[in-house]
Image: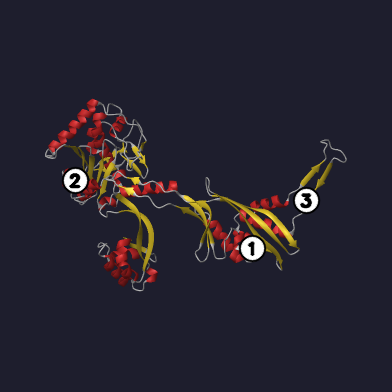
């Protein structure tokens, strides 16, 4: 018997009563000691059973029943099922034991569980005990553990949610909603001829996923021998058309899960993942909980909990017109490239686009660190011996908002050392900027101070550093630099456009302001010094044409 369990049993069995006389002084008749009658064998059995449950000693508890295998299965399931929302606290206690005769009795258990703040489940159950040839045993019934728990059933902690909220775009149209996604998997253990199955699958999904081939599927299977692979995710409408052909392919397995997705298939912004995160935080904050007992026939009885209320819809800042224009522009080059656009007057992030080469590196639009390069020329304007003045342009500031941590870069302050970022030629730099940071520079110059960004209305970012307004003389100089650079790049024909073309080694970037819009283009290993400017003009033409709507 373990020390914890021994202590519990000892506490139950070692009860005693001391009776003393009315007088506090000890006299010959003033103290009488009495010891309680030891518990019967039946009562001791129940004490041991409860102690084992409270110690989470499944086998010890099961061995005290008439059907140890079934009891162990139910007890294990209960502890696992009730841990679905995180490790709960739960204690069993003997309420009473009544011996009916020398070989039988019945008992009552009280149970009290807590699954977090305000999530409590208290109940009482009954059972019987009998003296068998092997000694006293609990007559096993699963409902000793939880009310209404049948044989072959289960008890679980579950999360409860109201109907999922919607995500709207800046034009107040539905941008994203929760839909069923059908994951098409290939299980090598279910196919006799992998070559035939992969060929048939590639042929069936060619209409929606032409880049997935029999060869690419076979390569994935070879890379993870014996394991299933994901071939493609299909929306319900596509799946409905292809389902019959898909299910006829040996080895194909379909897994259906709900997911928040964009209604417009053309929108592939890294902001979508951030909006999913914000949406999930919204759902988590309004989630309810429940304790469900499920029978072997699938019937469910709710024992405790409450339904989570409906969370508010999210109104994102993403502007489909600008976003789709950015997506058209960013795919015009064959190296990693990204575009970020911000409304300076409010801080709304209205677009973020990356091409497929950039996507392979992650969400680089908001976190990819690149050498400062010629952006130092802009930074020098606001510096006056104190490098923290970089925050006037939003540089060196990290912005935390629901669903997204947006980084502007790293600027060393005083003698503080920071990690070096990347080597350009033979030069190593310890100052860095992100594509988002470049867009913040443009927005700061347009606004006169760094705006607090946001991607969901009412959820403005929290900055890890304060930013002062740009001094008037420095602001005038910065705006002049953008005007001169735009003129030098031949952009005078784009009314109201100012910008600054820069480089970091072979990388090229362009910061632009036009009306109440600031954007930045960043291209790695650009094929030509004017690549970023060309991409910027491509973006403007797409926005002006209205083709992206």
Give the residue pinned by disc 3: 36
Q: Classify the position of the N terminus by image quarter.
A: bottom right
Q: Is residue 43 left or right of residue 77?
A: right
Helix, strand or loop under label 1: loop
Taking depth in this image into account, of 310 and 281 the one nearest to the observer is: 310
Question: On residue 63, which mark appears?
Answer: 1
Query: Where residue 92 sits: x, y (%)?
Result: 62, 53
At horizontal 32% and vertical 65% (from top left) the residue drawn is 240
Front of the two marks 2 and 3: 2
Query: Where residue 307 sits: x, y (%)?
Result: 47, 51
In the image, residue 477 sits, relative to residue 241, either above or below, namely: above
Give the residue pinned by disc 2: 543
Category of crowding for the residue at label 1, using alpha-carbon neighbours closer than 10 angstroms: few (below 14), some (14–19), many (at least 20): some
In the image, residue 135 sits, relative to residue 13, either above or below, namely: below
Helix, strand or loop under label 3: loop
Q: Tell whether label 3 touches label 2 (CB within 8 Å).
A: no
Query: Where residue 528 sits: x, y (%)?
Result: 16, 46
Q: Earlier in the sequence, mark 2 or mark 1?
A: 1
Front of the two marks 2 and 1: 2
Q: Earlier in the sequence, mark 3 or mark 1?
A: 3
Alpha-carbon distance for marks 2 and 3?
89 Å
Alpha-carbon distance for marks 2 and 1?
74 Å
Front of the two marks 3 and 1: 3
Taking depth in this image into account, of 358 and 39 the one nearest to the observer is: 39
Number of numbered markers: 3
Category of crowding for the residue at label 2, using alpha-carbon neighbours closer than 10 angstroms: few (below 14), some (14–19), many (at least 20): some
């Amino acid at each position: 018997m373990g020390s914890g369990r021994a202590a519990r049993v000892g506490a139950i069995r070692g009860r005693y009563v001391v009776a003393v006389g009315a007088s506090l002084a000890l006299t010959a008749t003033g103290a009488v000691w009495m010891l309680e009658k030891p518990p019967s064998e039946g009562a001791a059995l129940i004490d041991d059973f409860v102690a084992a449950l409270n110690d989470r000693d499944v086998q010890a508890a099961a061995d005290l029943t008439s059907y140890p295998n079934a009891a162990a299965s139910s007890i294990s399931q209960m502890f696992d099922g009730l841990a679905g929302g995180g490790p709960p606290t739960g204690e069993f206690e003997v309420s009473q034991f009544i011996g009916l005769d020398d070989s039988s009795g019945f008992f009552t258990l009280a149970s009290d569980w807590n699954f977090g703040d305000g999530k409590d489940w208290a109940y009482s159950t009954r059972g019987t005990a009998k003296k068998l040839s092997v000694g006293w045993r609990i007559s096993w019934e699963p409902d000793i553990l939880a009310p209404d728990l049948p044989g072959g059933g289960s008890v679980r902690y579950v999360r409860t949610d109201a109907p999922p909220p919607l995500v709207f775009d800046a034009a107040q149209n539905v941008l994203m909603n929760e839909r069923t996604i059908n994951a098409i998997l290939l299980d090598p253990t279910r196919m006799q001829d992998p070559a035939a199955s992969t060929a048939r699958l590639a042929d069936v999904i060619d209409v929606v996923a032409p880049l997935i081939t029999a060869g690419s599927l076979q390569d994935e299977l070879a890379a993870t021998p014996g394991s299933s692979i994901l071939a493609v995710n299909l929306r319900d409408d596509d799946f409905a058309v292809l389902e019959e052909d898909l299910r006829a392919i040996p080895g194909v397995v379909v897994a259906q899960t709900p997911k928040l997705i964009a209604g417009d298939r053309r929108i592939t912004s890294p902001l979508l993942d951030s909006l999913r995160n914000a949406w999930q935080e919204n759902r988590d904050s309004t989630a309810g909980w429940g304790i469900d007992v499920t029978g072997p026939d699938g019937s469910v009885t709710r024992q405790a909990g409450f339904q989570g209320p409906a969370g508010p819809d999210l109104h994102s800042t993403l502007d489909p017109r600008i976003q789709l224009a950015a997506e058209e522009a960013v795919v015009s080059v064959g190296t990693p490239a990204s575009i970020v656009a911000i409304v300076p007057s409010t801080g709304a992030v209205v677009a973020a686009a990356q091409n497929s080469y950039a996507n392979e590196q992650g969400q680089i639009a908001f976190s990819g660190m690149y050498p400062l390069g010629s952006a130092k020329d802009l930074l020098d304007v606001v510096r006056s011996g104190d490098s923290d003045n970089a925050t006037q342009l939003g540089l060196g500031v990290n912005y935390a908002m629901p669903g997204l941590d947006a980084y502007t870069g790293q600027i060393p302050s005083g003698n503080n050392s920071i990690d070096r970022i990347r080597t350009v030629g033979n030069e190593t730099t310890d100052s860095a900027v992100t594509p988002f940071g470049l867009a913040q520079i443009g927005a700061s110059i347009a606004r006169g101070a760094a705006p607090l960004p946001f991607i969901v209305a009412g959820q403005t970012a929290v900055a890890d550093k304060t930013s002062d307004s740009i001094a008037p003389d420095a602001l005038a100089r910065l705006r002049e630099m953008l005007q001169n650079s735009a003129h030098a790049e031949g952009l005078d024909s784009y009314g109201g456009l100012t910008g600054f073309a820069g480089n970091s080694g072979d990388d090229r970037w362009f910061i632009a302001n036009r009306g109440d819009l600031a954007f930045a283009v960043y291209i790695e290993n650009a094929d030509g010094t004017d690549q970023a400017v060309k991409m910027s003009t491509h973006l403007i033409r797409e926005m002006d044409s209205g083709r992206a709507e």
